Image (cartoon, helix red, strand yellow):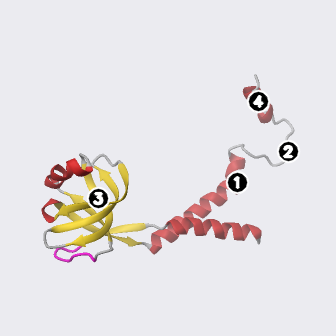
Amino acid sequence: MIRFRRLLVLFSLFAGAGCYSLRPVSTGVAPEVGTRIDVELNDAGRATLAPAIGAGVDRIDGMLVEQDSAGMTLAVKHMISLDGSVQVWSNEPVRIENSQVRTISERHFSAARTVAFGAAGVAGTTFMFTKGLALLGLVGDGDTKGDTTGQQLIRVIRP
């Protein structure tokens, strides 16, 4: 019963992380203020915004704070560069004009991915703690006859 509770707690931790997917916003349909969105910049947007956000930014992930007919303001969470590197921001506002945007995607919670990720995480962790550590030779089955692993480890630490 205790093992089941531990697995349940472990599953909750994995599931709590949550998985999200990006869905493109339809042309002409504006996301609501307060929505978490991902804005992919075009070449003009990268060049114009470079002094404010840095060179080579491909996408901006953040919360939509304000929107008008000319553009939008995001409270930025992440900047994703063309090389795939990610910069974490602390909700700093960035104004993006419509002419600087290639695509806009909305971030949606994916229950199916979260459950699959959680189940895989629990299964992998459970395997590792029940069988995997023994397969790696990190724990024994209680029979230490002929086992010199510990002696070799001591020699490495204390020559």
Q: Secondary structure at mark 1?
A: helix
Point out the tag, 2 or 4, that comes first from the N-terminus: 2
Give the class, few, some or many, for how many residues have Cα within 10 Å of label 1's Cα (few <14, many ≥20): few
Viewer-nearest of discs 3 and 1: 3
Q: Residue furthest front?
A: 92
Q: Is residue 24 visible?
A: no
CA gap between label 2 and label 1 equals 16 Å
Q: Provide the major secondary structure of the magenta segment.
A: loop
Residue at 16% across, 59% down: 100
Give the class, few, some or many, for how many residues have Cα within 10 Å of label 4's Cα (few <14, many ≥20): few
Q: Is residue 141 left or right of residue 84?
A: right
Q: Circle 2 is placed at which residue position?
A: 143
Write the start and end of the magenta stretch as one range: 24-32
Point out the tag, 2 or 1, that comes first from the N-terminus: 1
Q: Secondary structure at mark 3?
A: strand
Give the class, few, some or many, for how many residues have Cα within 10 Å of label 3's Cα (few <14, many ≥20): many
Q: Circle 4 is placed at which residue position?
A: 152
Q: Circle 1 is placed at which residue position?
A: 131
Tag 3–tag 1 contact (CB < 8 Å)? no
Q: Is residue 85 visible?
A: yes
CA gap between label 2 and label 3 equals 56 Å
Which three-letter amino acid code belongs to the residue tagged 4?
A: Gln
Tag 3–tag 4 contact (CB < 8 Å)? no
Residue sitting nearer the eye, 65 or 46 = 65
The answer to if 122 sits in the magenta stretch is no
The image position of residue 128, as x and y in percent, is 65, 54
Identify whether 78 is placed above or below 157: below
The image position of residue 29, as x and y in percent, is 20, 77
* Number of numbered discs: 4
Which three-letter amino acid code belongs to the residue tagged 1?
A: Lys
The image position of residue 119, as x and y in percent, is 56, 67
CA gap between label 3 and label 1 equals 43 Å
